[in-house]
């Protein structure tokens, strides 16, 4: 497959574009904003790793480096959550996506403007946080420059994500998030080595290493199984040739995990918001442990695990919510009817909608519970052994999910190219 990817010109160009984008992204993570001593900021993050570990993970370390990409794509993710939730109360927002190119253009403009507004708010918030903690001392002009730098960095990544989607493979925003997470793996693995392997006798070293590797591999395997799980519904197509109707069979595959990694990203981002907001107003108290994934399942302090319950509820909620956005059963039933297709034994229209709902709703429940189970395995390990690493279940699910989605797109293009060449 690797040879085929680079032989086909279009595929090769897309891969090279993604590679070039990754290089630009990683360089930007180390470009500091002006007027700030980054060493003092890094020391602050080391002493407050629990509260900001997830945010720092999503930014690929940019937050602790105080780089121009410190906000990363978190404003865009937050904007997506807000706009999609507003779509429930204001159907006109949701209708924009279905209103052809003009509607999508308007929707994207709303998304971008919301992202700009959130970027400015988050940039000011970070500035206040660092100032309150005595890390930086800026005048009005330098403060404006820092806020503009942060906002410009966030908007650049939003633009880069769109370009990767257009000229590369997969979803650009998801790829940026996955690359940021992957960049933290070496540091986290070294931390695990220092905590559980270094200085131990040979037998313990081997056992601990096997446990860590097993947990990672099991999590990856479960994500792959979940991604491939689907329910196939038979579809009959009717075509009239003269006075005769010809019927052909086809399938409508429905994934068990229709929403993919989106529920995990949204739930993790929302839970990290209280910690960030609280830091704007003078710091975090003991309560911040409820919102920190590293504090959950800690045998020395079980009370923080209540935060996991909120996390689980959010994951299930976003699984149902996002499935309604991406797989609307009413739209599917309408499209089947328009194209002369039907599910055997089921009438077109409302009966088809009811039939699909009876299939999709249990699938969402199974998929979200399975997703939670996968995420929870590394969380239990981190909490029970006080591992305190940012690379956990959430990270593995996001990275593996994005890789699978990207590889599937590459395979699809290679298959299309092979068919075209054969014809």
Image (spheres, rainbow, N blue to C red):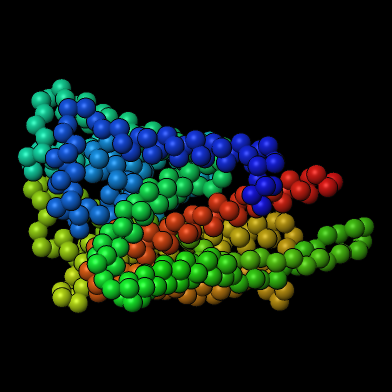
Above or below, comparing residue 318 to residue 82 in the picture: below
Above or below, comparing residue 64 to residue 319 in the picture: above
Quarter occupied by residue 275: bottom left
**Horizontal side of residue 287 vs 66, given as left or right:** left
Q: For the view shown, which residue lies furthest in the top direction?
A: 141
Choose between 401 and 197: the one closer to the eye: 197
User: Which residue shows up at 44% across the image and 37% down it?
Assistant: 23
Tally the marks. 0
User: Which residue shows up at 42% across the image and 34% down it?
Assistant: 24
For the question of whether residue 295 can be seen, the reply is yes
x, y percent for residue 339: 72, 56
User: Which residue shows up at 56% across the image and 37% down it?
Assistant: 16
x, y percent for residue 319: 43, 64
**Horizontal side of residue 45 vs 59, given as left or right:** left
x, y percent for residue 212: 37, 69
Choose between 403 and 240: the one closer to the eye: 403
User: Which residue shows up at 26% across the image and 62% down it?
Assistant: 194
Above or below, comparing residue 327 to residue 232 in the picture: above
**Horizontal side of residue 273 vs 345, given as left or right:** left
x, y percent for residue 342: 71, 67
For the question of whether residue 256 can be seen, the reply is no
Choose between 391 and 198: the one closer to the eye: 198
Quarter occupied by residue 62: top left
Choose between 89 and 134: the one closer to the eye: 134
């Amino acid at each position: 497959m690797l040879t085929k990817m680079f032989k086909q010109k279009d595929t090769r160009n897309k891969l090279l574009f993604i590679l070039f984008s990754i290089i630009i992204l990683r360089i930007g993570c180390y470009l500091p904003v002006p007027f700030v001593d980054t060493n003092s900021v890094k020391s602050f993050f080391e002493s407050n790793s629990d509260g900001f570990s997830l945010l720092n993970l999503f930014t690929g370390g940019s937050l602790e480096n105080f780089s121009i990409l410190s906000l990363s794509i978190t404003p865009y993710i937050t904007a997506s959550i807000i706009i999609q939730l507003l779509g429930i109360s204001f159907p006109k927002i949701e209708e924009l996506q279905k209103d052809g190119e003009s509607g999508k253009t308007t929707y994207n403009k709303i998304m971008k403007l919301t992202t700009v507004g959130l970027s400015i708010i988050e940039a000011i918030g970070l500035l206040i946080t660092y100032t309150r903690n005595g890390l930086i001392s800026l005048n009005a002009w330098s403060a404006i420059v820092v806020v503009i730098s942060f906002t410009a960095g966030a908007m650049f990544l939003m633009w880069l994500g769109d370009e990767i989607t257009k000229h590369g493979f997969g979803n650009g925003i998801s790829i940026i998030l996955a690359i940021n997470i992957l960049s933290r793996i070496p540091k986290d693995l070294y931390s695990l080595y220092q905590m559980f392997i270094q200085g131990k006798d040979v037998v313990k070293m081997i056992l601990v290493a096997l446990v860590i590797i097993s947990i990672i591999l099991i999590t990856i395997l479960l994500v792959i199984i979940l991604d491939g799980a689907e329910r196939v519904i038979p579809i009959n197509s009717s075509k009239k040739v003269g006075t005769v109707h010809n019927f052909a069979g086809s399938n409508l595959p429905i994934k068990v995990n229709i929403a993919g990694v989106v529920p995990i990203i949204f739930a993790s981002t929302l839970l990290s918001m209280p910690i960030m907001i609280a830091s704007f107003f003078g710091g975090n108290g003991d309560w911040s442990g409820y919102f920190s994934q590293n504090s959950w399942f800690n045998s020395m302090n079980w009370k923080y695990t209540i935060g996991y319950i909120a996390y689980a509820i959010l994951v299930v909620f976003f699984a149902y919510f996002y499935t309604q956005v991406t797989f609307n059963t009413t739209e599917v039933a309408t499209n089947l009817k328009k194209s002369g297709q039907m599910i055997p034994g089921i009438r077109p229209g409302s009966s088809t909608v009811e039939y699909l709902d009876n299939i999709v709703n249990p699938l969402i429940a199974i998929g979200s519970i399975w997703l939670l189970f996968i995420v929870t395995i590394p969380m239990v390990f981190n909490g029970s052994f006080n591992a305190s690493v940012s690379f956990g279940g959430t990270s593995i699910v996001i990275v593996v999910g994005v890789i699978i989605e990207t590889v599937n797109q590459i395979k699809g293009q290679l298959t299309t190219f092979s068919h075209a060449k054969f014809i």
